[in-house]
Image (cartoon, rainbow, N blue to C red):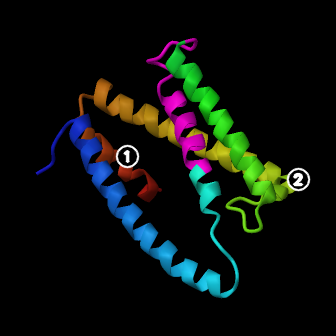
Amino acid sequence: MLLCGWAETLDQLVALRALQGVGGWLVLLRSRDEDVKRHETFDLAGAVLLVPAVGLGVLALTQVSVWPLASPAMLGSVAASILFLVLFLRRERKTRWPVVDVELFRTREFAAGFVGVVMGYALLYGMLSLMSFAFVKGLDSCAHVAGLKLATIPTAR
């Protein structure tokens, strides 16, 4: 039975993401054992700094229509995101095995490719957000029906 509401959809997504997190952790543990044998290690501190940097940035972006731009919550989220990003970049420059090799961004081709990929994803998710809004608000579809309609987009020709 499909539940038809944003809260139910969110609950199902949280459960799915928790399962994916457990699976990812198991893969990470297995690959970590192999990396230790080669004297390579995963930069856990860098990953811990990256998560709140991205998470708080996304939170600020998703709440821009709800929180006033000068509100303490918005300013705090943006400031904390920038702070964690700066700490992450400082960490990545110093560590031997970084999560993201920031030296790659010095190459013009790599930086241009990165900007192109980010713009492509921004366009894709912007379109998906607008389409889901149109399905739910404009065409009176429930969240699950809208999600199923959007899930067919990658298979369309």
Label 1 is placed on what type of residue?
Leu
Q: Secondary structure at mark 2?
A: helix
Of 144 and 101, nearer the camera is 101
Question: In the picture shown, does residue 101 fall above or below 136?
Answer: below
Of 41 and 135, nearer the camera is 41
Question: In the picture shown, does residue 51 fall above or below 138?
Answer: below
Of 134 and 19, nearer the camera is 19
Residue drawn at x 63%, y 45% is 120
**76 displayed left or right of 113:** left
Q: Where residue 72 appears, x then y in whole percent?
A: 53, 16
**2 displayed left or right of 136:** left
Q: Which residues are magenta?
A: 49-70
Provide the residue designation for mark 1: 150
Q: Where residue 58 appears, x then y in whole percent?
A: 53, 36
| The quarter of the displayed image where residue 43 is located | bottom right
Residue 118 in view: yes
Residue drawn at x 69%, y 48% is 88
Of 150 and 65, nearer the camera is 65
- Which numbered disc, 2 or 1, marks the residue closer to the eye? 2
Q: Where residue 140 appears, x then y in whole percent?
A: 24, 28
Which residue, as the protein is rendered here, is positioned at the far left?
1
Q: Where residue 84 appears, x then y in whole percent?
A: 64, 40
CA–CA distance in space, label 2 to label 1: 37 Å
Question: In the picture shown, does residue 83 fall above or below 113?
Answer: above
Provide the residue designation for mark 2: 106
Label 2 is placed on what type of residue?
Arg
Say whether disc 2 or disc 1 marks the residue closer to the N-terminus.
2
Residue drawn at x 49%, y 33% is 59
